[in-house]
Amino acid sequence: MATYDRFKAAERAVEIAKLAVQAGLINSVTPHGLDDPAKSGTKAAEWVGGFIAELTDRIEKL
């Protein structure tokens, strides 16, 4: 089984996130009540960032 330091875990998490976007598993959706594209983009970026951060933590623990 592979072991990952924090940097390698983050690289792998970003790679997985990219693959998920390419596969259509993650896409941009305007959250309810956000008609402002800038706010919507900010919220989407926060979500993806949180996804990558959580995935990094989990990969690092493998």
Image (tube, rainbow, N blue to C red):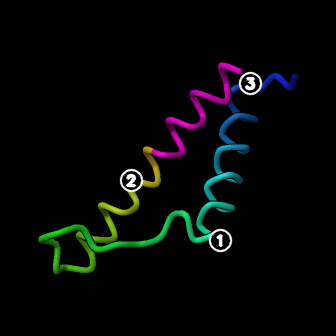
Q: Contact, CB < 8 Å: mark 3 with mark 1? A: no
Residue named by callout 3? 5
Callout 2: SS: helix
Q: Spatial distance from mark 2 to mark 1, Cα to Cα? A: 17 Å
The image quadrant that residue 44 belongs to is bottom left
Q: Earlier in the sequence, mark 2 or mark 3?
A: 3
Q: Which mark is residue 22?
A: 1
Verify whether residue 55 appears in magenta. Answer: yes
Q: Earlier in the sequence, mark 3 or mark 1?
A: 3
Q: Is residue 41 left or right of residue 18?
A: left
Amino acid type at circle 3 is Asp
Other-residue count near label 1 (Cα within 10 Å), few / some / many at <14 / 14–19 / ≥20: few
What is the chief secondary structure element of the magenta stretch?
helix
Residue named by callout 2? 47
Residue at the image point whose x is 74% and y is 24% from the top: 5
Q: Spatial distance from mark 3 to mark 1, Cα to Cα? A: 26 Å
Image location (x, y in percent) of residue 6: 67, 28
Q: Bounds of the magenta span?
A: 51-62
Q: Spatial distance from mark 2 to mark 3, Cα to Cα? A: 23 Å
Q: Earlier in the sequence, mark 2 or mark 1?
A: 1
Quarter containing the C terminus? top right
Quarter containing the N terminus? top right
Residue at the image point whose x is 40% and y is 60% from the top: 45
Verify whether residue 53 appears in magenta. Answer: yes
Image location (x, y in percent) of residue 26: 51, 64
Amino acid type at circle 2 is Trp
